Image (cartoon, helix red, strand yellow):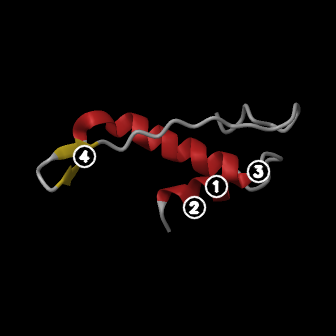
Amino acid sequence: MNLITEITDLYKDVEAPTVFFEWSIMAAISGSVGRRVWVNRRGVFLTYPNIYVMLVARSCMKKSIPC
């Protein structure tokens, strides 16, 4: 198992959709790694794993728990 499936399994009984948890975990990993990890694009430039996530849903869809 990987980190994302382990955390989503912990919150499987919560009403929030699992996709909210998956994207929140990916954004947390990206934020904690920061500029310490990069992809070298053939020596021309470096690409950093920045992920900006916006959870969009109707009111009362339990967006606050994954955030």
Q: Residue at 87% across / 31% down in the picture? A: 59
Q: Could you say where residue 4 lies in the image, as x and y percent from the top left? A: 54, 56
Q: Position of residue 2 (x, y in %)?
A: 48, 63
Residue picked out by circle 3: 17
**What is the spatial separation of the Cα atoms under label 3 and label 2, in whole angstroms?**
13 Å
Which quarter of the figure is the C terminus placed in? top right
Residue identifier under label 4 = 38
Residue found at x 49% / y 57%: 3
Decide: is 42 above or below 14. below
Q: Could you give the CA–CA distance between mark 4 and mark 1, rounded to whole angstroms?
A: 27 Å
The residue that disc 2 covers is: 5
How packed is label 1: few (under 14 Cα within 10 Å), some, or many (20 or more)? some
4 sits left or right of 54 in the view: left
Mark 4 packing: few (<14 Cα in 10 Å), some, or many (20+)? Answer: some
How far is mark 2 from mark 4, CA to CA?
A: 24 Å
Name the amino acid, label 3.
Pro
The residue that label 1 is drawn on is 8
**Local SS, label 2:** helix
Element type at mark 4:
loop
CB atoms of marks 3 and 1 within 8 Å: no
